[in-house]
Image: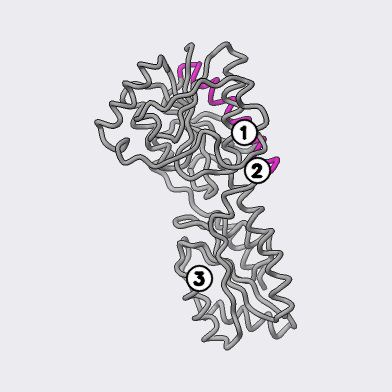
Protein backbone atom coordinates (compact mmCIF):
# COMPACT_ATOMS: atom_id res chain seq x y z
CA UNK A 1 0.00 0.00 0.00
CA UNK A 2 1.10 3.53 -0.75
CA UNK A 3 -1.79 5.50 0.79
CA UNK A 4 -4.04 4.77 3.75
CA UNK A 5 -6.82 6.70 5.45
CA UNK A 6 -7.68 7.27 9.10
CA UNK A 7 -10.89 8.52 10.71
CA UNK A 8 -12.43 8.90 14.14
CA UNK A 9 -16.11 8.21 14.58
CA UNK A 10 -18.82 8.12 17.25
CA UNK A 11 -18.31 9.57 20.70
CA UNK A 12 -14.94 11.20 21.26
CA UNK A 13 -12.55 9.61 23.75
CA UNK A 14 -9.36 10.99 25.33
CA UNK A 15 -6.44 9.39 23.52
CA UNK A 16 -7.92 9.45 20.03
CA UNK A 17 -5.38 12.11 19.03
CA UNK A 18 -2.54 9.96 20.35
CA UNK A 19 -3.80 7.13 18.13
CA UNK A 20 -3.99 9.44 15.09
CA UNK A 21 -0.44 10.60 15.77
CA UNK A 22 0.82 7.02 16.04
CA UNK A 23 -0.90 6.03 12.79
CA UNK A 24 0.61 8.94 10.88
CA UNK A 25 4.15 8.57 12.23
CA UNK A 26 4.31 4.79 11.96
CA UNK A 27 3.07 5.02 8.37
CA UNK A 28 5.59 7.77 7.60
CA UNK A 29 8.38 5.58 8.93
CA UNK A 30 7.26 2.88 6.51
CA UNK A 31 7.02 5.27 3.56
CA UNK A 32 3.22 5.31 3.43
CA UNK A 33 1.10 8.42 2.99
CA UNK A 34 -1.82 9.05 5.35
CA UNK A 35 -5.01 10.92 4.53
CA UNK A 36 -7.16 12.05 7.43
CA UNK A 37 -10.92 11.92 6.95
CA UNK A 38 -12.74 14.66 8.85
CA UNK A 39 -16.00 14.04 10.74
CA UNK A 40 -15.91 10.27 10.57
CA UNK A 41 -18.22 8.44 8.18
CA UNK A 42 -19.99 11.68 7.33
CA UNK A 43 -16.71 13.03 5.97
CA UNK A 44 -16.08 9.76 4.18
CA UNK A 45 -19.37 10.12 2.29
CA UNK A 46 -18.78 13.82 1.63
CA UNK A 47 -15.14 13.42 0.58
CA UNK A 48 -13.77 15.62 3.38
CA UNK A 49 -10.13 14.46 3.08
CA UNK A 50 -6.91 16.07 4.34
CA UNK A 51 -3.34 14.88 3.86
CA UNK A 52 -1.44 14.33 7.10
CA UNK A 53 2.28 14.17 7.81
CA UNK A 54 4.50 13.95 10.85
CA UNK A 55 4.45 17.71 11.28
CA UNK A 56 0.67 17.99 11.18
CA UNK A 57 0.31 15.73 14.23
CA UNK A 58 2.87 17.56 16.35
CA UNK A 59 1.69 18.40 19.88
CA UNK A 60 -1.64 16.60 19.65
CA UNK A 61 -0.80 13.59 21.84
CA UNK A 62 -1.85 15.38 25.03
CA UNK A 63 -5.06 16.88 23.63
CA UNK A 64 -8.50 15.48 24.39
CA UNK A 65 -11.20 15.06 21.76
CA UNK A 66 -10.17 14.42 18.17
CA UNK A 67 -8.46 16.78 15.73
CA UNK A 68 -10.20 14.92 12.89
CA UNK A 69 -13.59 15.73 14.47
CA UNK A 70 -16.44 13.27 14.64
CA UNK A 71 -20.08 13.13 13.55
CA UNK A 72 -22.96 10.73 13.03
CA UNK A 73 -23.99 9.85 9.47
CA UNK A 74 -27.43 8.51 8.59
CA UNK A 75 -26.42 8.38 4.92
CA UNK A 76 -23.49 6.05 5.60
CA UNK A 77 -25.88 3.51 7.15
CA UNK A 78 -27.42 2.99 3.71
CA UNK A 79 -25.94 0.83 0.97
CA UNK A 80 -25.89 3.84 -1.33
CA UNK A 81 -23.96 5.85 1.24
CA UNK A 82 -21.43 3.07 1.72
CA UNK A 83 -20.97 2.75 -2.03
CA UNK A 84 -20.36 6.50 -2.23
CA UNK A 85 -17.77 6.21 0.53
CA UNK A 86 -15.93 3.49 -1.40
CA UNK A 87 -16.00 5.60 -4.56
CA UNK A 88 -14.49 8.55 -2.67
CA UNK A 89 -11.74 6.37 -1.23
CA UNK A 90 -10.91 4.95 -4.66
CA UNK A 91 -10.88 8.42 -6.21
CA UNK A 92 -8.41 9.59 -3.57
CA UNK A 93 -6.23 6.51 -4.04
CA UNK A 94 -6.77 5.28 -0.48
CA UNK A 95 -6.02 1.56 -0.39
CA UNK A 96 -6.75 0.82 3.25
CA UNK A 97 -8.55 2.47 6.18
CA UNK A 98 -8.02 2.67 9.94
CA UNK A 99 -11.18 3.35 11.96
CA UNK A 100 -10.83 4.68 15.51
CA UNK A 101 -14.02 4.43 17.54
CA UNK A 102 -16.50 2.34 19.49
CA UNK A 103 -19.10 -0.28 18.69
CA UNK A 104 -21.02 1.63 16.00
CA UNK A 105 -17.84 2.82 14.32
CA UNK A 106 -16.40 -0.69 14.20
CA UNK A 107 -19.65 -2.04 12.74
CA UNK A 108 -19.17 0.48 9.94
CA UNK A 109 -15.64 -0.82 9.42
CA UNK A 110 -16.99 -4.35 8.96
CA UNK A 111 -19.46 -3.14 6.31
CA UNK A 112 -16.66 -1.49 4.35
CA UNK A 113 -14.54 -4.63 4.62
CA UNK A 114 -17.41 -6.66 3.15
CA UNK A 115 -17.25 -4.35 0.13
CA UNK A 116 -13.62 -5.24 -0.46
CA UNK A 117 -11.80 -2.45 1.42
CA UNK A 118 -8.94 -3.36 3.74
CA UNK A 119 -9.97 -2.02 7.17
CA UNK A 120 -8.45 -2.23 10.65
CA UNK A 121 -10.26 -0.99 13.75
CA UNK A 122 -8.88 0.63 16.88
CA UNK A 123 -11.22 0.39 19.91
CA UNK A 124 -11.71 3.85 21.38
CA UNK A 125 -14.60 4.49 23.74
CA UNK A 126 -14.77 5.60 27.36
CA UNK A 127 -17.31 2.82 28.03
CA UNK A 128 -14.71 0.04 27.66
CA UNK A 129 -17.48 -2.17 26.26
CA UNK A 130 -15.73 -3.73 23.24
CA UNK A 131 -15.14 -7.47 23.53
CA UNK A 132 -11.68 -8.85 22.89
CA UNK A 133 -9.64 -6.06 24.45
CA UNK A 134 -8.89 -5.49 28.12
CA UNK A 135 -9.04 -1.73 27.69
CA UNK A 136 -10.35 0.71 25.12
CA UNK A 137 -8.79 4.10 24.52
CA UNK A 138 -10.32 6.73 26.82
CA UNK A 139 -11.59 4.46 29.59
CA UNK A 140 -8.73 5.12 32.00
CA UNK A 141 -9.05 8.88 31.59
CA UNK A 142 -12.83 8.83 32.06
CA UNK A 143 -12.51 6.76 35.24
CA UNK A 144 -9.88 9.14 36.57
CA UNK A 145 -12.13 12.13 35.88
CA UNK A 146 -15.04 10.43 37.65
CA UNK A 147 -12.90 9.50 40.66
CA UNK A 148 -11.65 13.07 40.99
CA UNK A 149 -15.25 14.28 41.02
CA UNK A 150 -16.25 11.64 43.57
CA UNK A 151 -13.38 12.66 45.85
CA UNK A 152 -14.39 16.31 45.69
CA UNK A 153 -18.04 15.49 46.37
CA UNK A 154 -16.99 13.36 49.36
CA UNK A 155 -15.64 16.49 51.05
CA UNK A 156 -18.97 18.27 50.72
CA UNK A 157 -20.92 15.11 51.61
CA UNK A 158 -18.97 14.77 54.86
CA UNK A 159 -19.32 18.43 55.76
CA UNK A 160 -23.10 18.34 55.36
CA UNK A 161 -23.63 14.72 56.50
CA UNK A 162 -25.55 13.84 53.35
CA UNK A 163 -25.94 11.00 50.90
CA UNK A 164 -24.77 11.85 47.40
CA UNK A 165 -25.95 10.04 44.29
CA UNK A 166 -23.41 10.49 41.49
CA UNK A 167 -24.41 9.54 37.96
CA UNK A 168 -21.64 8.56 35.56
CA UNK A 169 -21.81 7.61 31.89
CA UNK A 170 -22.71 4.11 30.75
CA UNK A 171 -26.05 3.53 29.05
CA UNK A 172 -25.46 -0.16 28.44
CA UNK A 173 -22.28 -0.81 30.38
CA UNK A 174 -21.36 -0.39 34.03
CA UNK A 175 -17.60 -0.42 33.47
CA UNK A 176 -17.03 3.25 34.37
CA UNK A 177 -19.38 3.12 37.36
CA UNK A 178 -17.79 -0.03 38.77
CA UNK A 179 -14.18 1.11 38.36
CA UNK A 180 -14.74 4.67 39.59
CA UNK A 181 -17.01 3.51 42.40
CA UNK A 182 -14.39 1.14 43.79
CA UNK A 183 -11.55 3.64 43.36
CA UNK A 184 -13.68 6.42 44.86
CA UNK A 185 -14.76 4.40 47.90
CA UNK A 186 -18.48 4.38 47.10
CA UNK A 187 -20.80 2.49 49.43
CA UNK A 188 -23.19 1.58 46.63
CA UNK A 189 -22.52 0.99 42.92
CA UNK A 190 -25.51 0.55 40.61
CA UNK A 191 -24.90 -0.76 37.09
CA UNK A 192 -27.17 -1.99 34.25
CA UNK A 193 -25.85 -5.54 34.48
CA UNK A 194 -27.35 -6.12 37.95
CA UNK A 195 -30.85 -5.33 39.27
CA UNK A 196 -31.36 -2.53 41.80
CA UNK A 197 -32.11 -3.87 45.30
CA UNK A 198 -33.35 -0.96 47.43
CA UNK A 199 -33.57 -3.12 50.56
CA UNK A 200 -29.86 -3.90 50.25
CA UNK A 201 -29.05 -0.25 49.54
CA UNK A 202 -30.87 0.91 52.67
CA UNK A 203 -29.22 -1.82 54.76
CA UNK A 204 -25.74 -0.73 53.69
CA UNK A 205 -26.41 2.96 54.19
CA UNK A 206 -27.85 2.41 57.67
CA UNK A 207 -24.96 0.14 58.58
CA UNK A 208 -22.54 2.88 57.62
CA UNK A 209 -24.40 5.43 59.76
CA UNK A 210 -24.33 3.12 62.77
CA UNK A 211 -20.56 2.82 62.60
CA UNK A 212 -20.21 6.59 62.53
CA UNK A 213 -19.92 7.35 58.82
CA UNK A 214 -21.05 10.93 58.17
CA UNK A 215 -21.86 10.52 54.50
CA UNK A 216 -22.52 7.91 51.84
CA UNK A 217 -21.70 7.88 48.12
CA UNK A 218 -23.88 6.04 45.61
CA UNK A 219 -22.44 5.76 42.09
CA UNK A 220 -25.02 5.12 39.38
CA UNK A 221 -24.43 4.26 35.72
CA UNK A 222 -26.85 6.28 33.58
CA UNK A 223 -28.29 3.09 32.09
CA UNK A 224 -29.74 2.07 35.44
CA UNK A 225 -32.30 4.88 35.38
CA UNK A 226 -32.77 8.44 36.54
CA UNK A 227 -30.36 9.35 39.33
CA UNK A 228 -32.94 11.81 40.61
CA UNK A 229 -35.59 9.10 40.93
CA UNK A 230 -33.09 6.80 42.60
CA UNK A 231 -32.11 9.60 44.96
CA UNK A 232 -35.73 10.33 45.86
CA UNK A 233 -36.41 6.65 46.58
CA UNK A 234 -33.32 6.35 48.78
CA UNK A 235 -34.28 9.52 50.66
CA UNK A 236 -37.82 8.25 51.15
CA UNK A 237 -36.67 4.93 52.53
CA UNK A 238 -33.82 6.23 54.72
CA UNK A 239 -35.30 9.63 55.61
CA UNK A 240 -31.81 11.02 55.10
CA UNK A 241 -31.11 14.08 52.99
CA UNK A 242 -29.70 13.24 49.55
CA UNK A 243 -28.20 15.23 46.69
CA UNK A 244 -27.69 14.24 43.07
CA UNK A 245 -24.75 15.11 40.81
CA UNK A 246 -24.68 14.15 37.13
CA UNK A 247 -21.16 14.25 35.69
CA UNK A 248 -22.29 13.98 32.06
CA UNK A 249 -19.93 14.80 29.23
CA UNK A 250 -17.21 16.13 31.54
CA UNK A 251 -16.01 12.50 31.57
CA UNK A 252 -15.21 12.57 27.86
CA UNK A 253 -12.93 15.59 27.78
CA UNK A 254 -9.56 16.55 29.14
CA UNK A 255 -5.96 15.50 28.71
CA UNK A 256 -5.65 11.71 28.36
CA UNK A 257 -3.79 9.88 31.09
CA UNK A 258 -0.33 8.47 30.46
CA UNK A 259 -1.95 5.02 30.29
CA UNK A 260 -4.34 6.10 27.51
CA UNK A 261 -1.57 7.89 25.58
CA UNK A 262 0.61 4.78 25.73
CA UNK A 263 -2.24 2.43 24.85
CA UNK A 264 -3.33 4.61 21.92
CA UNK A 265 0.24 4.88 20.64
CA UNK A 266 0.72 1.12 20.68
CA UNK A 267 -2.64 0.39 19.08
CA UNK A 268 -2.18 3.06 16.40
CA UNK A 269 1.24 1.83 15.34
CA UNK A 270 0.12 -1.79 15.33
CA UNK A 271 -2.96 -0.97 13.24
CA UNK A 272 -0.74 0.38 10.48
CA UNK A 273 1.43 -2.74 10.56
CA UNK A 274 -1.61 -5.03 10.37
CA UNK A 275 -3.10 -3.06 7.49
CA UNK A 276 0.15 -3.07 5.48
CA UNK A 277 0.55 -6.79 6.11
CA UNK A 278 -2.74 -7.40 4.31
CA UNK A 279 -5.06 -7.61 7.30
CA UNK A 280 -8.68 -6.61 6.91
CA UNK A 281 -11.74 -6.67 9.15
CA UNK A 282 -9.28 -6.88 12.04
CA UNK A 283 -9.15 -5.06 15.37
CA UNK A 284 -6.00 -4.33 17.32
CA UNK A 285 -6.46 -5.09 21.01
CA UNK A 286 -4.71 -4.99 24.36
CA UNK A 287 -4.79 -8.46 25.91
CA UNK A 288 -2.76 -9.29 29.03
CA UNK A 289 -0.39 -6.37 28.29
CA UNK A 290 0.20 -7.56 24.73
CA UNK A 291 -1.02 -5.95 21.51
CA UNK A 292 -2.82 -8.45 19.30
CA UNK A 293 -4.90 -8.23 16.14
CA UNK A 294 -8.18 -10.14 16.15
CA UNK A 295 -11.00 -10.95 13.75
CA UNK A 296 -13.33 -7.97 14.16
CA UNK A 297 -16.78 -9.26 13.23
CA UNK A 298 -17.07 -11.99 15.92
CA UNK A 299 -16.00 -9.46 18.57
CA UNK A 300 -18.88 -7.16 17.68
CA UNK A 301 -21.34 -10.04 18.05
CA UNK A 302 -19.98 -10.83 21.52
CA UNK A 303 -20.85 -8.88 24.65
CA UNK A 304 -18.19 -7.70 27.06
CA UNK A 305 -19.55 -8.41 30.49
CA UNK A 306 -18.68 -7.10 33.91
CA UNK A 307 -15.96 -8.99 35.77
CA UNK A 308 -17.99 -10.76 38.51
CA UNK A 309 -14.96 -10.91 40.80
CA UNK A 310 -14.59 -7.14 40.58
CA UNK A 311 -18.27 -6.68 41.32
CA UNK A 312 -18.01 -8.95 44.36
CA UNK A 313 -14.96 -7.01 45.51
CA UNK A 314 -17.01 -3.82 45.38
CA UNK A 315 -19.58 -5.43 47.66
CA UNK A 316 -16.92 -6.57 50.12
CA UNK A 317 -15.21 -3.19 50.28
CA UNK A 318 -18.56 -1.49 50.93
CA UNK A 319 -19.09 -3.43 54.19
Residue 134 visible in the current orientation = no
Of the two numbered discs 2 and 3 on the same chain, state the one appearing first in sequence: 3
Within-10-Å neighbours for mark 2: few <14, some 14–19, many 20+: many
Which residue carries the number 2 mark? 256
Residue farthest to the left?
80
Of the two numbered discs 2 and 1 on the same chain, state the one appearing first in sequence: 1
Q: Is residue 67 above or below residue 50?
A: below
Secondary structure beneath disc 2?
A: loop
* Label 2 with label 1: CB-CB less than 8 Å: yes
Q: Quadrant of residue 145?
A: bottom right
Residue in the foreground of this view, choosing between 63 and 189: 63
Residue 275 highlighted magenta (yes or no) = yes
**Residue shown at 43% from the left, 42% from the top:** 103
**Residue shown at 51% from the left, 33% from the top:** 68
Q: Is residue 33 above or below residue 169?
A: above
Within-10-Å neighbours for mark 3: few <14, some 14–19, many 20+: many
Which residue carries the number 1 mark? 18
Which residue carries the number 3 mark? 227
Of the two numbered discs 1 and 3 on the same chain, state the one appearing first in sequence: 1
Residue 118 visible in the current orientation = yes
Q: CA distance from mark 2 to mark 3?
A: 27 Å
Total numbered circles? 3
Residue 175 highlighted magenta (yes or no) = no
Q: CA distance from mark 2 to mark 1?
A: 9 Å
Q: Is residue 69 above or below residue 23?
A: below
Q: Quadrant of residue 238?
A: bottom right
The rendered magenta stretch, by its main secondary structure, is classed as: helix
Q: Is residue 199 above or below residue 16?
A: below
Which region of the structure is painted magenta? 255-278
**Residue shown at 35% from the left, 16% from the top:** 91
Residue farthest to the bottom?
239
Amino acid sequence: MHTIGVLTSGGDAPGMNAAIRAVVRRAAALGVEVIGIARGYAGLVQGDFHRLNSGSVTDIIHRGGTVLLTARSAEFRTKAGQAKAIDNLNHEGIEGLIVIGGDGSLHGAVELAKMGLSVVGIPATIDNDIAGTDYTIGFDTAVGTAVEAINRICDTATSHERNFIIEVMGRHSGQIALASGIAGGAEIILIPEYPVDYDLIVERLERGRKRGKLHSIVVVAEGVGSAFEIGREIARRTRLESRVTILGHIQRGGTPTAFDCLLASKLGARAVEVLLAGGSSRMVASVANKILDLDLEPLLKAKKGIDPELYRLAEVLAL
